Amino acid sequence: MQGRQQAMGSITSPVAAGGAPASLSPSRRAWLRFKRNRLGYWSLLVFCALVLVSLCAELVSNDRPLIVRYEGQTYFPMLKDYPEKTFGGDFETPADYLDPFIRERITGGGNWALYTLNPYGPNTLNYFAKAPNPSAPTRDNWLGTDDRGRDVLARLIYGFRVSVLFGLALTVIGVVVGVLTGAIQGFYGGRTDLLFQRFIEIWGSMPELYLLIIFSAVFAPSISLLLILLSLFGWMGLSDYVRAEFLRNRQLDYVKAARALGVGNAQIIWRHILPNSLTPVVTFLPFRMSGAILALTSLDFLGLGVPPDTASLGELLNQGKNNLDCWWIVVSTFVVLVVTLLLLTFMGDALRDALDLVSKRHPGLLKKFGGHAMAAGCTISEDDFDTFDEALQLVANEQMDPSLLARQISTDGPLDAQWFSADTVAALDGAVWGPGFEPPMFSDMVDVIGQRLVGERHLKLSLRVQGQVRDGIWFGRTEPLPAKTQLAFRVSLDEYQGRQRVQLMVEGMAQG
């Protein structure tokens, strides 16, 4: 590879081939396609905004001011407890900033205080409330209070944060354990796979809910205990998908080539098989998040979840059940829960929209379409292939960004004439290429001195490159080339009558 760097440097030249499929990186291509799905894209933005607000909950909903300017001094009540004597009170106890007397002292006579948008914490009890608890939505409490006088909006904000962080932690643990166990089963197979499968069958038959009830009775309720218990069972479904991907990918040529070169098992798994086996993992993520949030909410509703004083959506739903006349509790909690799950579902379902649109525009074209979001597929009659292709192209042109329909090829620049040799081609062919480390692509200005069709589908070329005549071929190209143009190409060996010659495998042509 040192010789390659000396020959090519670090030149990157974009070369476009009009009408060809996009050659962006897989992650970039997936992101652009996702953005074209407005529902999924905006669901992601809204969900991220809600998560950001919940992570900054102390700056949004708090019973302490952010800053207090009192008698020439600046105070930060969120960072330090101040006795009410500091602000003209009579006692050494911490100041109650909801007390009308304290509020009047810190906001009158040239003094000022900067309160949060919602001046209540998740467990704040307003002893100066004007209405009995639970109270309906008012100007002071936008979503009302619960049966203890705590602000419902504040508990929703903090409860949403607990649910999201819990769901994220449970998802990460489940993904790590599921990928690890699935990779071991799929890569080694044989007796290892058999033993793991029997263990999963036995472990999966354990009564998860009964174990939660038993442990909740023995130990004090806590988020960490709940996270550990749910993590013990949440990895098995993903493990099966990763196992299947590893069983398929371990038989492919690039893995066999890595073995032949003496690459260790750990490197083969980490650098080669795992990046090509993450499709089900990525697809699972939003659905695992929603499942984890639902699990926490359900257990909190049953009293088996977080400690009683911890703000949670399940605890609010339980309060709504016990106080059916207080509609504001259950309605607001239900809306937050439904919106959260819908946003996650929309993000997970965004990949299915193109085929669904084709199915609606051409009834009967797709003989079978659907399945769940992680395994959507379709069946098409052989006679309808052309119709399906036209319909899919129409949907792609409508929904995909134009940049996706114009191929962009990143190249390593020109290849010096001295490197047009059989040894160079052999060195490149003997290297192991994979995701994130693609085989080299070169580009150069060439003179086209001869071209003809081969098999009515491919273009055979005679090119002058850096003053030397080279053979080239462009598979799948039938249109003639201009006399002088810039081409993107790879190099290969063409053997004819016992003689080896380096030829150019053309991949694209610059536009304009």
Image (cartoon, rainbow, N blue to C red):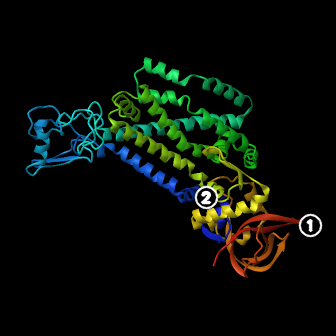
Relative to the observer, which residue lies in front, 109 or 447? 109
Categorize mark 2 by other alpha carbons within 10 Å: few (<14), some (14-19), many (20+): some
Secondary structure beneath disc 2? loop
Task: Count numbered badges in the picture.
Answer: 2
Image quarter where the N terminus lies is bottom right
Relative to the observer, which residue lies in front, 313 or 469? 313
**Residue 340, position as x, y percentages in the image:** 45, 44
Relative to the observer, which residue lies in front, 104 or 507? 104
Q: Residue beneath label 1, please?
A: 497
Residue at coordinates 69% horizontally, 78% vertically from top-left? 485
The amino acid on which the numbered mark 1 sits, given as a three-letter code, is Gln
Residue at coordinates 37% horizontally, 41% vertically from top-left? 332
Q: Quadrant of residue 17?
A: bottom right
Asked if the residue at tag 1 contacts the one at tag 2, i.e. Cβ–Cβ closer than 8 Å, the answer is no
Secondary structure beneath disc 1? loop
Question: Could one spot residue 360 in this view of the protein?
Answer: yes
Height in image: 52 above or below 297? below
Distance from disc 2 to disc 1, alpha carbons, whole Å, reads 39 Å
> 287 left or right of 221?
right
Q: Residue beneath label 2, please?
A: 25
Height in image: 138 above or below 359? above
**Residue 108, position as x, y percentages in the image:** 10, 48
**Residue 327, position as x, y percentages in the image:** 34, 37
> 338 left or right of 308?
right
